[in-house]
Amino acid sequence: MSDTLSLSEVEILEQIKSEVGSHKVFLYMKGTPDMPRCGFSNQVVQILNHLGVDYGARDILPDPRLRQVLSAWSEWPTIPQLFVDGQLVGGCDIVTEMYQVGELQPMVGAGAAS
Amino acid sequence: MADLAELKSLIETALPGASATLIDQGGGDHLAAEVVAPQFAGVPRLAQHRMVYAAVQHRIDDGSIHALALRTRAPETT
């Protein structure tokens, strides 16, 4: 039993590493970008959409273990969690403040010639 | 129900030289804090927030704080 559970959690962690590793910008959130189910997640989605950033997103609500494994790995207790270049940037407070002071835009490549 | 004076003291003790301002955003356990600390200079925001959370972690764990919105910065260098 415990072997099965730990194997699943290892698989979940491998999924997380793969997701944040294969997207420049990746968001773990409650709900989806089209239908956020939490005001904090919605705020980060609004900022990313406003900046016109391409990003991946995953809803943590369907599988409670995803949130547990994610938070254990990232050492960050709350959702949303925004990753850029494989590194945790922060949650709603940090993303909002970085957006307001202009630090987020260059980090996510917004406004860069492409 | 959080004790704002205690939390201010916890943060300012953990980060000597820091100035913490706490407000109750409702219900006594949804708080906001602005923390200005010399230890934040050159430190990414995520790490700044971790430093503040660490100072009050046991008050999060025991339920005194349900939510803590943070704004952090280093003092202006003048």
Image: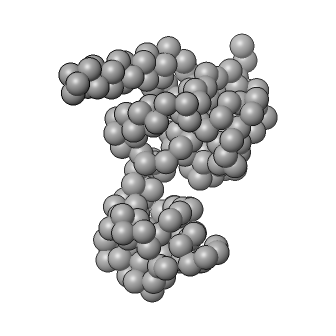
Question: What colour scheme was applied to this rendering of the protein?
Answer: one colour
Q: Nearer the viewer, residue A96 or B64?
A: B64
Q: Residue A97 in the image: state x and y as whole percent.
A: 63, 52
Residue at the limit of the structure toward the front, as seen here: A1
Seen in the picture, residue A26 relative to A61 is either above or below; the reply is: above
Q: Nearer the viewer, residue A108 or A7?
A: A7
| Residue A70 visible to an observer of this rendering | no
Q: What residue is at 70 percent from the left and 25 percent from the top? A: A53
Q: Viewed as shown, does residue B74 lie left or right of A105?
A: left
Q: Determine the image quadrant of residue A7.
A: top left
Image quarter where the C terminus of chain A lies is: top right
Q: Nearer the viewer, residue A22 or A69?
A: A69
Q: Residue B76 in the image: state x and y as whole percent.
A: 53, 66
Q: Determine the image quadrant of residue A71.
A: top left
The tally of labels here is: 0
Q: Nearer the viewer, residue B20 or A35?
A: A35
| Residue A31 visible to an observer of this rendering | yes
Q: What residue is at 23 percent from the left and 24 percent from the top? A: A1
Q: Residue B78 in the image: state x and y as whole percent.
A: 53, 69
Seen in the picture, residue A100 relative to B53 is either above or below; the reply is: above
Q: Residue B72 in the image: state x and y as whole percent.
A: 52, 61
